[in-house]
């Protein structure tokens, strides 16, 4: 089954009954909690425009929430830069710190935020940061990058990663779905890839078509997730660690101008 994201009119106003004045203290409390737990990015997404897509992917138990609290932790540039060296030790270190540790931190943030929302009297659903729930479709119950995109934190690049203006795709995401009266922080950001095709050109399994994101098109129009998945399995079999991330490494929006090695000779 291929899914496309068709944005429609916002349903926020019909679903959120509580007044803005009441939402402000809770908004501030949740944002402060998320920041205190180490997140670098925070946004609230009105999920109404993508409800049909969310319903197809996760069902009503996910689509019934009108907003998502999207939170991100920036990855260490020094560790991301290891990806270009393609050696086993670098891959092991990158995978442990930038994937396993950061995902655990994000999951803990989501649980704490969801608990706070629940204590305030609202429904809250912490979506695991990186948990595949459908092996066939190679996806989880909700696209984390979609929530961050709708919160105005970045655009979905030709790499299918969420690209932030400041740190490109070097950010990992988690979200909490809720019916709390949180005020959306933005709207879907327009693609900023322009003529760039760096991720498309570097991908070792040619998984990207080079098409820009469009909400009416399925992921398959841009990205062959199965090809990327096969490449990971092949790498794991050959080297004992499943890492690639070249599409994340190469994006000019996150890539540093110089490295520590450059500056220290
Ligand atoms: S992780 Fe590697 S194989 Fe997968 S899409 Fe990115 S560059 Fe291609
Ligand atoms: S590498 Fe270039 S094309 Fe790929 S996501 Fe980044 S800006 Fe877009």
Image (tube, helix red, strand yellow):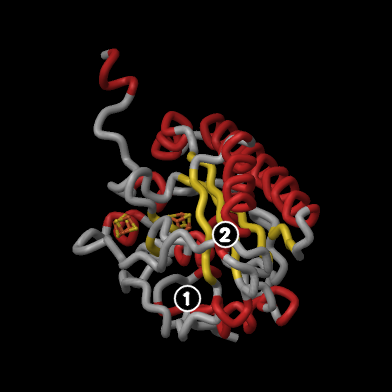
Residue 21: mark in rendering: 2
| Residue depicted at 52% across the width and 31% down the height | 90
Pointer 1 local density, CA inside 10 Å: few below 14, some 14–19, many at least 20: some
Residue 219: mark in rendering: 1
Q: Is mark 2 within 8 Å of ligand 2?
A: no
**From the viewer's perspective, is 87 left or right of 174?**
left
Q: Position of residue 19 (x, y in %)?
A: 60, 67
Q: Position of residue 207 (x, y in %)?
A: 42, 66
Pointer 2 local density, CA inside 10 Å: few below 14, some 14–19, many at least 20: few
| Residue depicted at 27% across the width and 61% down the height | 192
- Which quadrant of the frame does ligand 2 lie within? bottom left
**From the viewer's perspective, is 253 left or right of 99?**
left
Element class at badge 1: helix
Q: Position of residue 101 (x, y in %)?
A: 65, 37
Pick the front one: 102 or 201: 102
| Residue depicted at 63% across the width and 78% down the height | 15
> Looking at the image, is 87 positioned above or below residue 174?
above
Q: Is residue 259 visible?
A: yes
Number of numbered tags placed on the structure image: 2
Looking at the rendered image, the disc whose residue lies closer to the viewer, 2 or 1, is: 2
Pick the front one: 99 or 186: 186
Element class at badge 2: helix
| Residue depicted at 54% across the width and 36% down the height | 94
Q: Is the C terminus in the top left, top right, bottom left or bottom right quadrant?
A: top left
Q: Is mark 1 within 8 Å of ligand 1?
A: no
> Looking at the image, is 218 positioned above or below residue 242?
below
Pick the front one: 11 or 191: 11
> Looking at the image, is 69 positioned above or below residue 36?
below
Toward the top, the furthest residue is 264
> Looking at the image, is 167 positioned above or below residue 3?
above
Q: Position of residue 230 (x, y in %)?
A: 57, 62
């Amino acid at each position: 089954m291929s899914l496309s994201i068709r944005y429609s009119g916002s349903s926020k106003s019909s679903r959120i009954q509580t007044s803005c004045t009441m939402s402000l203290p809770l908004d501030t409390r949740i944002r402060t909690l998320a920041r205190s737990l180490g997140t670098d990015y925070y946004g609230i997404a009105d999920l109404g425009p993508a409800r049909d897509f969310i319903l197809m992917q996760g069902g009503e138990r996910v689509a019934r929430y009108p907003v998502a609290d999207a939170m991100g932790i920036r990855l260490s540039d020094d560790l991301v830069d290891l990806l270009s060296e393609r050696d086993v030790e670098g891959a092991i270190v990158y995978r442990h710190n930038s994937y396993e540790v950061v995902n655990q931190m994000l999951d803990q943030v989501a649980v704490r935020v969801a608990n706070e929302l629940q204590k305030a009297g609202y429904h809250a659903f912490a979506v695991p940061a990186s948990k595949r729930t459908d092996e066939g479709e190679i996806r989880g119950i909700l696209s984390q990058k979609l929530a961050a995109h709708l919160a105005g934190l970045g655009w979905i690049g030709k790499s299918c990663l969420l690209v932030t203006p400041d740190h490109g795709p070097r950010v990992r995401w988690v979200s909490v779905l809720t019916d709390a009266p949180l005020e959306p922080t933005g709207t879907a950001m327009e693609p900023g890839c322009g003529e760039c095709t760096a991720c498309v050109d570097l991908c070792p399994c040619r998984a990207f078509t080079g098409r820009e994101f469009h909400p009416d098109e399925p992921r398959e129009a841009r990205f062959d997730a199965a090809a990327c998945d096969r490449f990971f399995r092949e790498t794991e079999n050959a080297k004992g660690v499943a890492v690639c991330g070249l599409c994340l490494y190469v994006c000019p929006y996150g890539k540093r101008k110089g490295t520590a090695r450059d500056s220290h000779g």
